[in-house]
Image (cartoon, rainbow, N blue to C red):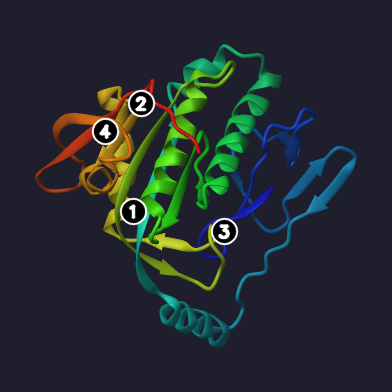
Amino acid sequence: MINVQGQGEFWLVDLGSSNGTYLNGRRVGQPCRLNDGDRVEISSFCFVFRQKKATSITEAERTTEKTIQDIRSMNCWLMVADLEDSTQYLKSLPAEQVPRYTGRWLSTCKQVVEDHQGAINKFLGDGFFAYWTDRENAPQVVARALGALLGLLTAVDTPRFRAVLHYGKVFVGGEASLGEESLMGTEVNFVFRMEKLASNLAVPCLLSEGAHKRLKHLVPSQEHGRHAVQSFEGDFPFYAIKESWSRDG
C-alpha cells in the first residue's frame, strides 16, 4: 500500500505479505517514505515511483496560498499506538519473518480503526497515528475501537503494544480525504509525548484527561497520577485502562 501522509509525502507499507515488498532492492520491514525514482518490486513486477517537484515560483505560491486557505480547525480523538520493545524482540525473529510480523499487526490494527469509522493518518515504523472526527456518537465508537484493539493483546501471535488516546482541537490542512489530511497543532504534539510517557510508565493503555472525561462511563479506567509531559508546562492527570478489558459491538 502507498499511503499519503501530509503534504506531498508518500509512504510504502507492506501489510504482512508472505513474499515481501522490496524498495530499491531491500525488503520493506517498516513503512518507508518514497522519493522520485525509487524502484518498488512486488513479485515479478517492478514499478518506478515518480514525484515531480514544483519548478516555478508561481506554482509554489499557488500551492502555498491554496494550503493556507484550506486550513481549518476541528475537534478530534487522537490515538498513537506502538509496539513494545520492538527492536529487542524483532532481533530474536528470523530476518524473513520480521516484515510479516510487523506488517500483519499494522494491517489488523488498520482494519479495526477503519471498521470503527476512524482512519490511520500516519504509519510510524512500528506503530501508527489514527484519528476520529468528533461527531454525535464518537465516544461510543471510539470506546468500541479501543476495546477491540486491547482485545488483540489476548490473541495468539499478537505482539505487545501500547496505545494512548487524547481528545482536543487540531488544525487540518489540505483537501485530501479522511486519513490523508495533515493534522497539526499542540494537541497532536501532546499525544505523541503521551506515548513516550506511557512507555516510561509501562502502561499498555493511557488516557488523557480530555479523553477520560468523555469515556469514563464507557470504559473502566482508573487514575494513574499526575505527570509531566515533555515540552509542556505543568503536570497533567492521566488514566489507565485495565489490559483485561475489551469490548466490541
Q: Which mark is residue 204?
A: 2
Determine the CA span between mark 2 and mark 3: 30 Å
Q: Which mark is residue 21?
A: none
Question: Of circles 1 and 2, which is in front?
Answer: 2
Give the residue type at disc 1. Val
Give the side of residue 105 with respect to residue 16, left or right: left
Question: Of circles 2 and 3, which is in front?
Answer: 2
User: Image quadrant of residue 176?
Assistant: bottom right
For marks 4 and 2 on the same chain, the one whose residue lies earlier in the sequence: 4
For marks 4 and 1 on the same chain, the one whose residue lies earlier in the sequence: 1
Residue under the point 43% across and 33% down: 147
Asked if the residues shown at circle 4 and circle 2 are in contact, with their CB atoms under 8 angstroms apart, the answer is no
Give the residue type at disc 2. Pro
Q: Which residue is mark 3?
A: 9
- Determine whether the residue tagged by mark 1 lies in a helix, strand or loop: helix
Determine the CA span between mark 4 and mark 2: 11 Å
Question: Of circles 4 and 3, which is in front?
Answer: 4
Q: Nearer the viewer, residue 89 or 222?
A: 222
Q: Which residue is mark 1?
A: 188
Residue under the point 36% across and 57% down: 76
Neighbourhood count class around disc 1 (C-alpha, 10 Å): few under 14, some 14–19, many 20 upward: many
Determine the CA span between mark 1 and mark 2: 20 Å
Determine the CA span between mark 4 and mark 1: 15 Å
Determine the CA span between mark 3 and mark 1: 18 Å
163 to 92, vertically: above or below: below
Q: Nearer the viewer, residue 10 or 51?
A: 10
- Determine whether the residue tagged by mark 2 lies in a helix, strand or loop: loop
